[in-house]
Amino acid sequence: KDLISHAKFMLIVEKDATFQRLLDDDFCNKLSPCIMITGRGVPDLNTRLLVRKLWDTFQIPIFTLMDADPHGVEIMCIYKYGSVSMSFEAHHLTVPSIKWLGLLPSDLERLNIRKDVLIPFTKQDQNKLASIQKRPYIACQPMWKKELEIMAASQLKAEIQVLTSLSSDYLSRVYLPNKLQFGGWL
């Protein structure tokens, strides 16, 4: 009931492995106080309720750190807009102000990520992306739409861990601090 926090923002991390790496790197203490949450992939109901409760209580920015693939975008959309199966409860389970921090498809080119560490799309990826692009809320998000078009054009996807091809601690030392400091989210 009486939640107290000095957190400046929340970070929703798609994968538990990335979440654990950020904990190991002491990310929350090195940058600024924050709340990190992972749903370990597609979030369950309790994780979504927790995110909403924390947002209602603290009204701090919420960022998502997802893979640059259709599955990661789908997970982010569940937090922001809700799932199809629970659409009748969307207002209790979503936070419309959630921002897409990364990994953005445009980051892959901007950071000169080598093509050999990227993963080719499968037919399932193509179908998932096409489905997401048709959703009405995507039309209201021109920057998201552009990122999805970059993904569709390249037919390549990347996991967050691809950043280790730049350096082992690039995510916590360079990528996230720069994105948060300079506003690199959508």
Image: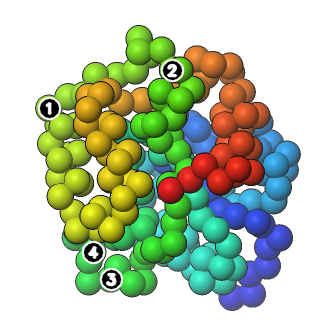
Residue at the spot x=32%, y=45% of the render?
Answer: 148
| Marking on residue 123 | 1
Q: Earlier in the sequence, mark 3 or mark 1?
A: 3
Query: Quick one: label 1, few (<14), some, or many (20+) residues within 10 Å?
Result: few
Question: Percent x, y for residue 91?
Answer: 39, 84
The amino acid type of the residue labelled 4 equals: Met
Q: Is residue 135 visible?
A: yes
Residue at the spot x=32%, y=36% of the render?
Answer: 151
The amino acid type of the residue labelled 1 equals: Lys
Taking 30 as reference, is 177 left or right? left
Query: Depth check: 152 or 75 in front?
Result: 152
Real-space Cα distance between discs 4 and 1?
26 Å
Closer mark to the observer between disc 2 and disc 3:
2
Question: Percent x, y for residue 159?
Answer: 45, 31
Closer mark to the observer between disc 1 and disc 2:
2
Q: Which residue is mark 4?
A: 86
Q: Secondary structure at mark 2?
A: loop
Q: Which residue is mark 2?
A: 113
Q: Which residue is mark 3?
A: 89
